Structure formats: C-alpha cells, structure tokens
Amino acid sequence: MSPMYSQDKLPDGVKVPAGNSVAMQTVGVGEITYECRPKKDMAGQYEWVFIGPDAVLNDRKGMQVGKYFGPPATWESKDGSRITGAQVAVAPNGAGNIPHQLVKANPANGSGAMTGITYIQRVATVGGVAPAMPCDGNKIGAKQNVHYQADYIFWKAS
C-alpha cells in the first residue's frame, strides 16, 4: 500500500478543494516540446513557446498505467478512458523545474480509471523548463524536446 498522499506542503493555490480524495497517483516521465517563435507584438524578439508534453504515466511501482500528451493536454489510462482539463492555478517549484499545477478535469471520454476524475495535480516536478539555448530569427520553427518528470495525482469527489 502506498503512503497516504499529503498536500500539506503545497502552496494553497494548487491544493485540491475539500470534498475530493485521491483516486490514483502516477509519475509522469517524458519530454516537453518547445518551438522557437517570434514574440507576440514584439518585433525582432523571439521566445521558446510550450507546444506540448509526451510522457508515460507509471504507478508508484514503475508499471505503466497510461500516458500524457498534447495539445490539448490529455491524460489517458491504459483502459482507454481519457480526460482533458482547464488550468486553475500554478505555483513555482524552484529554478529549472516546471511549476506545480492544479487542473480541473473535464468529464472523461470512455469509461475506466479516468471516469469521475475531478482534479489533476502536478507536483514534485523536475526539469521541463524552456531550453536555455538562444531562440533567434535563424531558429524560427526549430523545436527542442526537454526531459521532465512530475507526479500527477488524480482526484475524485469524496
């Protein structure tokens, strides 16, 4: 039995509201793709723009239970059920790591592990930030994949 998951050390903005309980704990391991694009309304300036994730979702024992991909951000169980959602909040998690995130789930497609999920929390993030290499006019359209890992905690109404 895995230890009880606690949100006590998380910033308030990314805590799941009362009335929900943990349904599934996963560890996402994969890459996030960024693309070099001109900055909006800033002529001659460029930036790495988040395109989407491509990760496997493993249980706490390391067995694959699903995948996470996008756009749009989609969590899919091996049983074929899948969800998307809308970001509620983010909170920093140290330099070089993508932020903690709270997502309100949309109703699931298909029936299975994702049925009834209300929230997805991204915590314990490692890596995944935009590339450090420069993005300039010579690199427009160039894509870079950045390795990352994060825990995705799935919640259902209690």
Image (cartoon, rainbow, N blue to C red):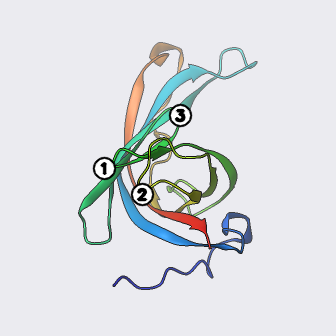
| Left or right: 151 in relation to 107 | left
Identify the residue under disc 1. 78
Mark 3 → mark 2, Cα distance in angstroms: 19 Å
User: Where residue 78 appears, x then y in whole percent?
Assistant: 31, 50
In percent of width and height, residue 9 lies at 61, 80
What number of labels is visible? 3
Residues packed near mark 3 inside 10 Å, few (<14), some (14 to 19) or many (20 plus): few
Going 44% across and 43% down the picture, which residue do you hit? 110
User: Among all residues in the image, which is located at the extreme right?
Assistant: 41
Q: Which of the two marks, 1 or 3, is nearer to us in this view?
A: 1
Percent of width and height locating residue 134: 49, 31
The quarter of the image holding the C terminus is bottom right
What's the amino acid at mark 1? Lys
Circle 2 residue: 113
- Residue 94, given in percent of the width and then of the height, sits at 56, 64
- 64 vs 112, left or right, is left
Secondary structure at badge 2 equals loop
Residue bearing mark 3 = 72
Residue that appears at 55% across and 57% down:
116
Q: Does the CB distance between marks 3 and 2 fall below 8 Å? A: no
Query: Label 1 to label 3, Cα distance in Å?
Result: 18 Å
Give me the C-alpha separation between circle 2 and circle 1.
9 Å
Asked if residue 101 lies left or right of residue 132, the reply is right
Crowd class of label 2 (few under 14; some 14 to 19; many from 20; radius 10 Å): many
Q: Amino acid at mark 2?
A: Ala
Tell me which numbered mark, 1 or 3, is placed earlier along the sequence: 3
- In depth, the one of 111 and 122 nearer the eye is 111
Say which label, 3 or 2, has the lower sequence index.
3
In this orientation, which residue lies closer to the viewer: 87 or 24? Answer: 24
Q: Which three-letter amino acid code belongs to the residue tagged 3?
A: Pro
| Residues at marks 2 and 1 touching, judged by CB atoms closer than 8 Å | yes
